[in-house]
Amino acid sequence: MLTRCGSGFGAVALAALARDKAYAETLAIPSDAQTQLGGIAGHGTHFPAKADHVIFLYMDGGPSQVDTFDPKPALDRFNGQNPGSLFNVEPTQFNNNGNVLASPWKFKKYGDSGIPVSDLFPHVAKHADELCVVRSMVSEFPEHTFANYFLHTGSGLQGRPSMGAWVNYGLGSECKDLPGFVAMNGGLIPPGGLDCFGSGFLPASYQGSVFKPSGSAVANINPTESTAGRQQTKLDLVRQLDQNALPRFGGHDSVESAIRNYELAYQMQMAVPDLMSLADEPESIRQLYGLDAKYEQTRIYAAECLLARRLVERGVRFIELTCPNVGADRWDQHSNLKKGHANNALAVDQPIAGLLADLKQRGLLERTLVVWAGEFGRTPFAQGKNGRDHNPFGFTIWMAGGGVKPGTIYGATDEFGYKAIENRVEIHDLHATMLHLLGVDHTRSTYRFGGRDMRLTDVKGHVLNEIVA
């Protein structure tokens, strides 16, 4: 039919797509052919996917669950009392434990679902019926760097592939002129550094590309040559040198990835300026996200969120947004909890709400999984007088869109919000569920390294079927 229609132009288009690794059928391709496919895992989706894209809203430092999405009236009743007389207090990072600390913010129930949200998030609260709030997260690490590696890569060790790299390795990219994995740098790179976005032992072309939410986004994106022909001549020479080196190195990943990255960089010279043209957005969208907000950090995060939507529209598979610098120590309020959390929430609240609303009105939220999470939570008792220490024993994240049940609360912590006691969820479970929503069986998306088949969820992870729509 394609051959007969349109004088064969349909067949020509189909042939072009079939040659593209991002669109061609790659199911059941043997592992020994992966090198020829540029490192693509070869499995594609294992079953029909509910989501095509992920936007990971990384809340650097660990927001307090009892001050955001997990209200605990017991903290008001026992405010100022010795926590050791009420429950077993685990060792903390700084061993400067104070008394039980009630939340400085009030909670209200929102939407038809009645999900409680604190006054920290008045804009996000309006979208409560889109949220799936998981209150029973746990982590294996109480320190930022190891906990960040664990959250991002499924391992507390440095050098493992990030979840964004795993997603693109397994599914390929839908976009030919932008990276499949983009990390938006709002001003704070997580403790642990760029390895949180790295490709580890996967081919280097799957690592996250760091964009800034302003200016040219990427360094050296504009050509310096006087003519396009001069630049093309240089690129042809580089490509020829790399191709000549391939036989000598036996198809080494570093050379192959360099070739692909050069080609992608050339394509990005046209795509990135178009991506960054936020002036083309109507005034209503600018106001929705908070691009004209008085608080500078709100404007920064608003640009990140708006760019995330534009990246999704262009087919980028995985986008991570990092927090702007509000002058405090991230969400990591070991002291001055009220000021630090208030500033961080002011920076991200309106932009996140704008992102959810914009994705929904464009019909994108249904196929885009939005994940809001920090690396751990915080203690229900004070550090010193007015801060909270790290708490990996029970904390809250939320997800929206992408096939999760909206207006849902899953899991619970104890009456003080200290430890998960119902439907305990590990980081591996979160990763397994994210991959499941993307149509990937986490046990079958593997890469042979160090003598065994490695995967994002290691040898653990259970899909949270109860929160899948």
Image (cartoon, grey):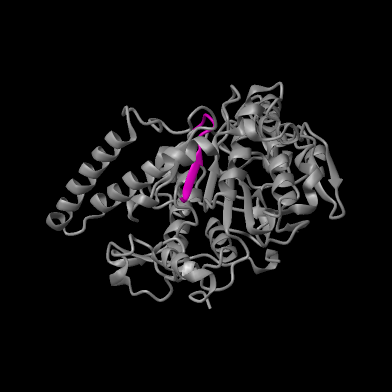
Labels in figure, total? 0
Q: Is residue 138 magenta?
A: no
Foreground residue among 313 and 89 = 313
Foreground residue among 142 and 146 = 146
Res 120 → quadrant: top right
Residue occupying the far bottom of the picture: 1
Name the spot of residue 261 as percent of width and height, x first.
34, 46
Which residues fall within the magenta stretch?
A: 180-188
Residue occupying the far left of the picture: 248
Name the spot of residue 55 as percent of width and height, x first.
59, 48
Name the spot of residue 72 as percent of width and height, x first.
78, 45
Relative to 244, say whether 235 is above or below. above
Relative to 413, say whether 89 is above or below. above
Foreground residue among 152 and 418 = 152
Q: Is residue 233 left or right of residue 58?
A: left
Q: Is residue 416 left or right of residue 27?
A: right
Q: Identify the residue at horizontal 33%, vertical 55% (top origin).
A: 203
Relative to 345, say whether 327 is above or below. above
Q: Is residue 74 visible?
A: no
Q: Is residue 103 visible?
A: yes
